[in-house]
Image (spheres, rainbow, N blue to C red):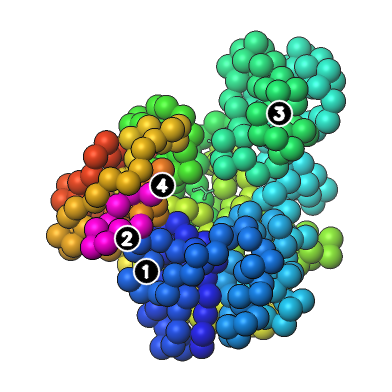
Amino acid sequence: MKVLVVGGGGREHAICWKLKQSPRVTELFCAPGNGGIAEIATCVPISAIALDEMVDYAVKEKFDLVFVAPDDPLALGLVDRLEKAGVRAYGPHANAAIIEASKSFSKNLMKKYGIPTANYEIFSDKQLALDYLDKQDMPIVIKADGLALGKGVIIAATKEEAGNAVISMMEDQKFGNAGKTVVIEECMSGPELTVLAFSDGITVLPMISSRDHKRAFDRDLGKNTGGMGAVTPGADLSPQEEKYMFDAIFLPTIQALSAEGRPFIGVIYFGLMLTATGPRVIEYNARFGDPEAQAVLPRLNNDLMDIIDACMNQTLDQVQLSWKPGASCCVVMASGGYPDAYQTGYEITGIQDTGRIVFHAGTKIVGQKVVTSGGRVLCVYADAPSMEEAIDSAYAGVSRISFKDMHFRRDIGRTLPGGKD
Ligand code: AMP
Ligand code: GLY
């Protein structure tokens, strides 16, 4: 099969790495790709959101499958466009990807179908939002409705902070159109957990759980980022807890989307909080998480292409996922300054010496050198029989790599985001 992966971060490197192992994938392309992906796939300089160009290219090259991995092209309807042009494409259609692209849509869906989540109100009028805040207890959570690179969520400790968040989103349009509507919701507490799942629209097949570390600095300090590292498993869940999540959250979500005429075919991301009253949904994403994909996919024994086919043929009920036992850890190495402004173009050394799988996120090849080209630069992966060993092994890899101003957290897997150390 001739396959194109759309995207160019660490997640797409992990997807390409996994697809490359499939004997069924004979030719692998990635658009736009990055310096690491270029070692295993042919990179094509088309932006993931250049939909017209991507569709023309996919038609011309006669791909057997296009895997659309990032949120933006999914929300913009790249899968719909490719299908219309006669190209098989993997990922949710825009009408299902909306569970990530519109928080108000997903909150209303959860309310309608009784899926546990934080209580909330939705506002498109700034004054009504401010009046509402006045009557609420703090802390409270303010969310821009649309896609905002994971930055459109403010947890306000005081009414002043909450009011400022509403004004920055609704009046100053800090997140552009994404913040025209805001969701104001109850602040939950508890450890966070990610569960990714394959879905064919009817069956939902959860993967091993994972846990992302979103804050920039150790001990969960600093700003929210795209994710600074992840581990699997994300929690020690009992079979009863797993069953509850499946029965109360995973399956009802997939059934709700189908009932609404929006069958979800692809990878769905359940961002959960394990609260004192049970697991509740923080958010849905319509794709693999980044860096969760890098921590999860190397432990998957199945051929990813077989699972993709089963999703697209509605035969996922016949698939059983199999996992390499133990635990995994991946540590993101970022450019100094990320998630704010940072410099790029610095040479990276030592990747070959790590003896680890190193997924590239923001790199490019210049001459013979690998140089930094983004905020998140690399993701160093290791697995082992125990979590402690996996973490130590990943950090042993990190210690061999060097580039100017590099920044990484030293506590990935060692602290519990939203929980205690
Ligand atoms: P989201 O983009 O919705 O996943 O939110 C980003 C982060 O904000 C989450 O990973 C949580 O740490 C935090 N967060 C979002 N919603 C809530 C909530 N209702 N209560 C507490 N924390 C939240
Ligand atoms: N790691 C969080 C995300 O992919 O949205």
Q: Would you call the spot at circle 3 few (<14 residues within 10 Å), some (14-19), or many (20 or more)?
A: some
Residues under numbered marks 1 and 2 in contact, where contact means CB atoms less than 8 Å apart: yes
Q: Label 3's element?
A: loop
At x 66%, y 12%, the residue is: 159
| Residue behind mark 4 | 374
Residue 365 — which label?
2
Mark 2 → mark 3, Cα distance in angstroms = 37 Å
What amino acid type is highlighted by mark number 2? Answer: Ile
Quick check: 241 left or right of 51? left
Q: Residue, x 23% and y 63% (percent of image)?
A: 368
Q: Main secondary structure of the magenta part?
A: strand
Alpha-carbon span between mark 1 and mark 2: 9 Å
Residue tagged 1: 38
| First to last magenta residue range | 364-374
Q: Secondary structure at mark 4?
A: loop
- In the rendered image, the quadrant that contains the C terminus is top left
N-terminal label among 2 and 3: 3
Q: Position of residue 280 (x, y in %)?
A: 62, 43
